Amino acid sequence: MKNSLLVLNAVLVLSVISCKKSTENGNKDVLKMETSETSVVNNNGKPDSVSTRSSVEIVNGQKTVKDSYVYKATDGTLVKVIFETNPKESTVAITSNKKTFTLPKTETKGDETIYKKDDMTARVKGDSLHLEQGNNIIELKKTKI
C-alpha cells in the first residue's frame, strides 16, 4: 500500500514538472507589448480627463495599435469603443448589449473622422461619437469609469 502511494505521488510530481510550459516558447513572429494606462493630450496640449487603455502588438514587423474607451449615450447606456490602427486599415469597433459593430475608416475631414459600413456611419470628433443607422441617431460622449 505504501509503495503504491509513493509511486502515485512520484508520477504526479513528474507529470506536473514535465507539463510546465515556458513563456519563452511559442510563436516567435508575434510579439506583444505591455498594455498600460496612458494619458491623452487634447488639441490644446493639456492632458485629457478621459483615460484610455492602449495596446501595441507587432506581428511580422507590422505594428497594430488598439485604443479602448468607454462612451456613454444620452440615455445612460455604456458603450465600449475600440479604435484599431494597422498599416492596412483603421477601424472602430462599437460594442453594446453583447453586439459588436466594426466599421472601417472612410475619410477624415479636419478634426472629424468618419467610419462607415453598409447603412451605419460613425463620426468621431473630439470626445463625441455620433452614430447613425438608418433613421436612428445616437450621441455618445467619452466617460471615465
Image (cartoon, helix red, strand yellow):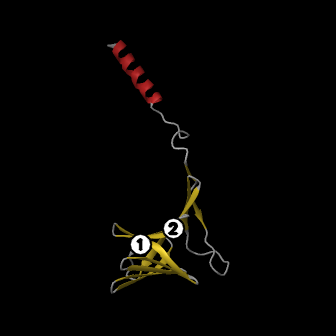
Query: Farthest residue toward the bottom?
Result: 135
- The image shows residue 95 at horizontal and vertical percentages of 39, 69
> Which of the two discs, 1 and 2, labels the residue nearer the N terminus?
1
* Picture quadrant of residue 19: top left
Image location (x, y in percent) of residue 123: 47, 81
Reply above or below: 13 against 65.
above
**Total labels drawn:** 2
Q: Residue at x 31, y 13 (%)?
A: 1
**Residue appearing at x 47%, y 33% in the figure:** 20
At label 2, the amino acid type is Glu
Q: Nearer the viewer, residue 38 or 58?
A: 58
Q: Which mark is residue 79?
A: 1
Mark 1 is surrounded, within 10 Å at the Cα level, by few (under 14), some (14 to 19) or many (20 or more) other residues, namely: many
Tag 2 residue: 89
Horizontal arrangement in the rendering, residue 135 relative to residue 128 (left or right): left
- Distance, label 1 to label 2, CA atoms, is 23 Å
* Three-letter amino acid code at the position of disc 1: Val
Residue name at image x 33 percent, y 69 percent: 97
Label 2 Cα crowd, 10 Å radius (few <14 / some 14-19 / many 20+): few
Q: Is residue 86 above or below residue 32?
A: below
Work out whether residue 138 can be spotted. yes
Disc 1 + disc 2, Cβ < 8 Å: no
Front of the two marks 1 and 2: 2
Q: Position of residue 126 (x, y in %)?
A: 55, 81
Say what secondary structure mark 1 lies in.
strand
Q: Quadrant of residue 73?
A: bottom left
Residue 131: x, y in percent? Answer: 41, 81
